[in-house]
Image (spheres, rainbow, N blue to C red):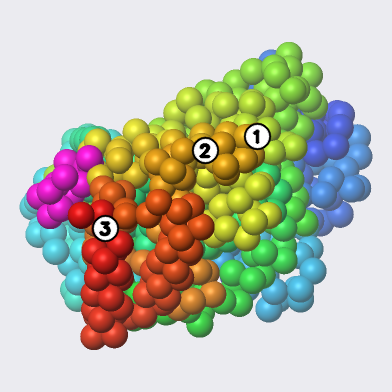
Amino acid sequence: MSTMEAPSSVKECATGRVVRAFGNLVHVQFNGHVRQGEIAFVDVGGSQLKAEVIEVAGTEVKLQVFEDTRGIKLNTPVRFAGDLLEAELGPGLLESIFDGLQNRLVDIAERCGYYLPRGVYVLPLSRTTLWKYVPTAKVGEVLARGDVLGTTREGRFEHAIMVPFSIFGKVTLTWTIAPGEYNIDTIVARARDAKGNELSFSMVQKWPVKMGLAQGEKIKPSKMMDTGERVLDTQIPILKGGTFCTPGPFGAGKTVLQHHLSKYSAVDLVVLCACGERAGEVVEVLREFPHLIDPHTNEPLIKRTCIICNTSSMPVAAREASVYLGVTIAEYYRQMGLDVLLLADSTSRWAQAMREMSGRLEEIPGEEAFPAYLASRIAAFYERGGVYQLKNGKQGSITICGAVSPAGGSFEEPVTQATLAVVGAFCGLSRARSDARRYPAIDPLISWSKYVIDVAKEIESRVPGWGEMVQRAYRFLKEGNEIGKRMEVVGEEGTSLEDIFVYLKSELYDFCYLQQNAFDKVDAYCPFNRQIPLFKLINHIFETPFDFTNRDKAREFFLTLQGKIKSMNSIPFDSSEHEEAFQEISEMIERARKL
């Protein structure tokens, strides 16, 4: 295993010495040239502590150290790398578990044990693994950044080896390697730029994580992302390339919901970014994923997943880096024409890390002491999602989901409000629904999606009248909620039978359709083609006038109906037993119908 080298002296990088330190904020007097965002190494007792330049003022810079700063003293030497905080991109990212600085945690554990020491950095991608490389570009071709030089196989995906995105302008290919098995550092192609400079390309490239990686035309999202959650796919739909957030109080099920999305969403790849999440929940993911089967491919889920762990027990300063690392890896695969889902859990803890550093920089605080630029940082993060039309005719997308953990469960706090201003859908989790053991605990009455009309247009060709059915269901849900509140005051006796029917129908919709059984293998994941007939049945119930003049009989009928539909939801969709249950429910509704 290789250890990442400190900056090379060949680059003639700047050097400096510590003059002040406050927590993980270190003031350094330097000689040479330094730029904002550059990486530096603080030498503490032979350990090289990685840091980032976050402010430059004359001949003094402020560094954010990503490690425990114990032992830093006056005149501690500092060396600058000459490079920005970068992600290493190439074959081998999938099935990997990184920390926020892209250190492969398995390699560190093998070398140092289960307690992470400071100052130990390993190369993110293996230099010993051989990849079967097939060149596709021809000598003499004129290429640009992002164009494909050749391909290799990463699991079931064709991994494109592209002209590095750091290359601007046209280059002419002068040599390419023969097909064969090589490690990622092998030079696979050479080219000449417009100035006549010779360039060499390997299977690995680097990109600054805080700069958007994009090549192609950004277009409007138009295809629905099937999540297997009925409340999302029907009431709060998400588009591939869209953005959405899942705010909720502690214990409402944000992490469980993100785990469901990572398991069942109809995308090619998932980048799971645990930013400040509790270590126990992350360990659960690491234990489960190698054994879970992807329902879309029948392969282990880990084969399409990249996990970034910067848990609450790891250095706070690296939380910001972990979020940007995740979106950079997602952008890299999007440029290959793949659909990627990025799950960030949670952006609130990322914002807390920004607040901590902003306080140490003595910046003017905004609301609740968060930095004044909080909203712009959150907006810039979500802006890196989207759908891109690539030159080869393919389309790639990044769908971004950010979990938000508002203090006290209040959606009025700054992080939630800044997020709601930029996302395309809001899936608000409710403490009341969570305490009532309703899964998912998404409250459909406070949640919304800007993609409802776009999804309705896409689905209308398969299911005529889908948009109208969704609106009708929401109307019943809203009216039923209002009637339920009135009944709490005046009682059931003071409520008209017509209102009772509306209330019972809305409860049936909520209980039988919007809720799912997370412990049932069939009902936990409900693909969209299974949702369509069930939703049509629910709408048929909405439109049906029932022949009941007694409240007790009406309630008894709807309770029986609820039980039968819930039982049907646990039966495999393509079985004859499911068809029989569906037919029995339809006949039951017709018998109770008012003539």
**Residue at 86% over, 33% down:** 21
Tell me if I can see residue 451 in this picture: yes
Q: How far apart, in angstroms, are the residues tagged by discs 2 and 3?
A: 21 Å
In the rendered image, which residue does mark 1 sit on? 489
Q: How far apart, in angstroms, are the residues tagged by discs 1 and 2?
A: 10 Å
**Residue at 69% over, 38% down:** 409
Say which amino acid is labelled 3: Arg
Q: Quadrant for residue 566, please give it.
A: bottom left
Say which amino acid is labelled 2: Thr
Q: Quick one: quadrant of the C terminus?
A: bottom left
In the rendered image, which residue does mark 3 sit on? 593
Report the side of 539 relative to 38 (left or right).
left
Q: Does the segment drawn in magenta span residue 466? A: yes
Earlier sequence position, callout 1 versus callout 2: 1
Element type where label 3 sits in the image: loop
**Residue at 76% over, 32% down:** 356
Does residue 180 sit above or below 281 in this rendering? Answer: below
Where are the magenta residues, as a range?
A: 456-468
Checking the image for residue 495, the label placed there is 2
Viewer-proximal residue among 551 and 439: 551
